[in-house]
Amino acid sequence: MSITYPLALPSTRKWRSSNWASQDRTAEVASPFTGDGQAIVWPYQRWTPTLTLVSMKRADAQEWAAWLRSLRGRSGTFLLGDPARPAPLGAAAFNPGTPLVKGAGQSGGSLLIDGAPASVAAWLKRGDLIQLGAGATARLHEISEVVNTSGSGEAALSLWPALRESPADNSAIVLTNPVGVFNRTSDVVEVPTDTAGFYDLAFDCVDTLRG
């Protein structure tokens, strides 16, 4: 059977640590005579996590090593969310409603939605995560500003990273266990083992920007 990407993570996962890093690309141009300058902000925004698994014995380590190799270096993709942020800290954790994208053709760092519960303060908090799309189109976004819903259950979400594609009207917004599509940053799979037979595995990845 051929492998179909994106893959799910192995079920035997316990994280020792996760460094949920991110990157923006900017530049500063300054006059050599006055020092006056300006910042240039490029559209590049990307998650760059490093994940480290707890030490494990052969049965679990073998599964993980084979899974990493099945990605064929940087070519294969998988679904990943921040293990430290599986659910919102805002009121959406217990009162999510049925949030949907409100209107097609949206772009940039803001997204209009409806279907949220009416008149809820701090429905989403700064740093909460959401998912747009599913499967190979899943994108992981962070909320940049506190979200309060209107009396009709509408809201404007400030997002990082900005939208890379325009989500379809009425497409669902995932609030619990949100994920995006990621790929590894290396072609090498290392499987270090100590004399007690414990394996220590870690890997770096980025969210996939391929078409």
Image (cartoon, rainbow, N blue to C red):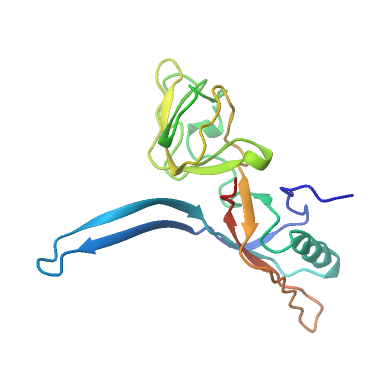
Q: Going by the picture, which residue comes out furthest to the top?
A: 152
- The answer to whether any part of residue 120 appears in the image is no
Q: In this view, does 21 lie to the left or right of 52?
A: left
Q: Which of 46 and 120 is in front in this view?
A: 46
- The answer to which quarter of the image holds residue 98 is top right
Q: Going by the picture, which residue comes out furthest to the bottom?
A: 195
Q: Position of residue 25 (x, y in %)?
A: 39, 57
**116 is higher (above) or lower (below) than 75:** above
Report the residue at 65% width, 66% height from top.
Answer: 203
**50 is higher (above) or lower (below) than 120:** below
**8 is higher (above) or lower (below) than 91:** below
Q: Is residue 150 left or right of residue 206?
A: left
Report the residue at 78% width, 75% height from top.
Answer: 198
**118 is higher (above) or lower (below) than 50:** above
- The answer to which quarter of the image holds residue 64 is bottom right
Q: In this view, does 147 lie to the left or right of 63?
A: left
Q: Nearer the viewer, residue 186 or 129?
A: 186
**Could you tell me how many numbered marks the image carries?**
0
